[in-house]
Image (cartoon, rainbow, N blue to C red):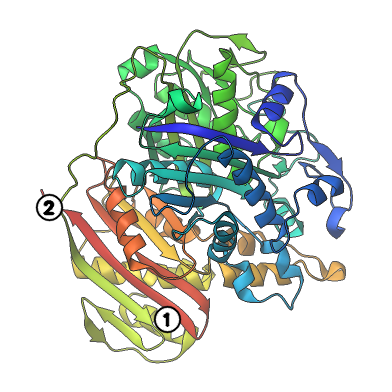
Amino acid sequence: MVYKLADNIISPLGATTEMNYQAVKSGISSLRRYDHLWGIPEPFTASLFSAEQQKQYSIDGLTRFESLAYCSVKEAIQHTNIDLSSHRVVFILSTTKANVELLEDPTTPPSMLYPGMSAKHIASKLNIQTEPIVVCNACISGVSAIVLAMRLLESNSYDYAIVCGTDVQNKFTVSGFQSLKALSEEACKPFDIERIGLNLGEAAATIILSNKDESSKFKRNWVIETGAIRNDAFHITSPSKLGDGAFETLRAVMTDETVENLAFINAHGTGTLFNDQMESVAIERAGLQSVPVNAYKGVFGHTLGAAGILETVISMASMDENIILNTRGYEEKGVSGKITITTENKKTSQGCFIKMISGFGGCNGAILCKDVQSEKVDRKVQSPGTRPILRKTHSAKITPNGVSIDGLSRESHGEGMSLITDIYKRYLDDNPKYYKMDPLCRLGYIATELLLMAENSPSDTSRNDRAVVFFNGSSSIMADMVYEKSIEDKDNYFPSPSAFVYTLPNIVIGEIAIRNHYQGETSFYILNQRNDDIIEQVVEASFIDKDTTSMISGWLDYQDDAHFEADLFITEVIK
């Protein structure tokens, strides 16, 4: 359990949490229709900052994306007395595409596109001295970042966590979702019978957490009691029809006491056919069909890496007034799951809510938030629990110099991608989908398969106790460049859905989960540069999830055909 000290939301609706909350409560939306914006031929509806707002949030020396994150953190931190230079403070940045819009300029140095570099720029401007961590876990990144912060605080690695989720929209992101036929030209309709797609949005949202109860000092009254991340192991873009991963996250954060005190579930509610249907099924499976469900995408659009944090903060603000907010855009139920969708703002006397979310790569997340004034919340300072004893059992490494398993070199030939394909043909050669994957996925897939060969692990047995957690420095840079080429020529404009989906680095984990039927946690983190101490810190903290007893983790990076590395290992809990 961790305590909220402060928060902030910056969106086209306002520069503070209060401004944004009042807009939602009043039924105001920032969604607008755009025609031919950024040279995109198809119209779309989105929530975007105006030129005046972009200027307002512009910070010298930072990009548009970085400036927005900086302004949000700066506003939130003013409501605390945290010493940002302390080694007990960690900065966690949640984003899906960071500075990807800079790809349009061919002179942009590749390092400017690395999210870890952006996080470092923001942290330095704020005078944060510790190394930042970027969470890049598709649409669940914001919730994933909160879960990571909770674990690092509960393990006593830090005293304070500044968690900021930010994404800006551009030709790259809009065209990509259009290529998947996922966007709606009109305002989205979460869970509605006439829903046809989502709207994208821009925002920055910050939540500051502590492992100490300082709520009386800062006049804050929320704790995040628990959180979970699970994978469907079904498909990299389509959710499980049974809502397996979402159901498992709900199961992991619920207790009988929770259900009795649950005010509402804030769903992902994108307005797409498959996501909303899946969420409704998962909620019913969890026995929560009578609990009110709402969604905020009809107000803010889908803000990607900011969504999980923004929607958590808005939910907390509504509960401060004992209000359950309505679901803008919803009129008539269009999902098969038996759920209770809010159609108007209404009062509640309950003391907690669940935020759930899902994303590409089969990932799902949920957190349970409680009012610390509730009689059912233990307000004592939490002490770190007993850490499990871990051991590494197997390792696999692939670099331009060759391949090794458990420290022993194996035969391989070639350079760059030809080397990786030679390893695949020599030792595996049993998955035609390999040739459809981007370089990062190919590298991670092969290294993982070599690990499992060393473990002699059966590939036909489902596991929900094994997590897959990867780190890198360049995100999905190679896939980003491939996709950018498909949209750079306005006279030969052909956004490729198969190319776009691999522009999320966590897709490699989705591929591994599907291949091996792993339904445990899957997470992807980005660092400014490889730091084995941080990797070990995050891996150890991830075992706080009691359902995780085994993990495949390590460094997985593919900058170009001359610079790549997979250094993966299996870690087990010693029982």
Can I make out residue 430 in this image?
A: no
Residue at image point 73% right, 61% down: 60
- In the rendered view, tell whether residue 446 sits above or below residue 388: below
Q: Residue lying furthest left in this view?
A: 575
Spatial separation of the CA atoms under disc 1 and disc 2: 33 Å
- Relative image position of residue 444 (x, y in whole percent): 41, 68
- Relative image position of residue 152 (x, y in whole percent): 35, 47
Can I make out residue 409 in this image?
A: yes
The amino acid type, in three-letter code, at marker 2 is Ile
- Relative image position of residue 513 (x, y in whole percent): 38, 54
Mark sitting on residue 420:
1
- In the rendered view, tell whether residue 309 sits above or below residue 330: below
- In the rendered view, tell whether residue 1 sits above or below residue 428: above
Circle 2 sits on which residue?
Answer: 574
- Relative image position of residue 464 (x, y in whole percent): 29, 44
Residue at image point 74% right, 34% down: 14
| Mark 2 crowd level (few <14, some 14–19, many ≥20, 10 Å Cα) | few
Q: Name the residue nearer the viewer: 291 or 112.
A: 112
Compare marks 1 and 2 and give the one earlier in the sequence. 1
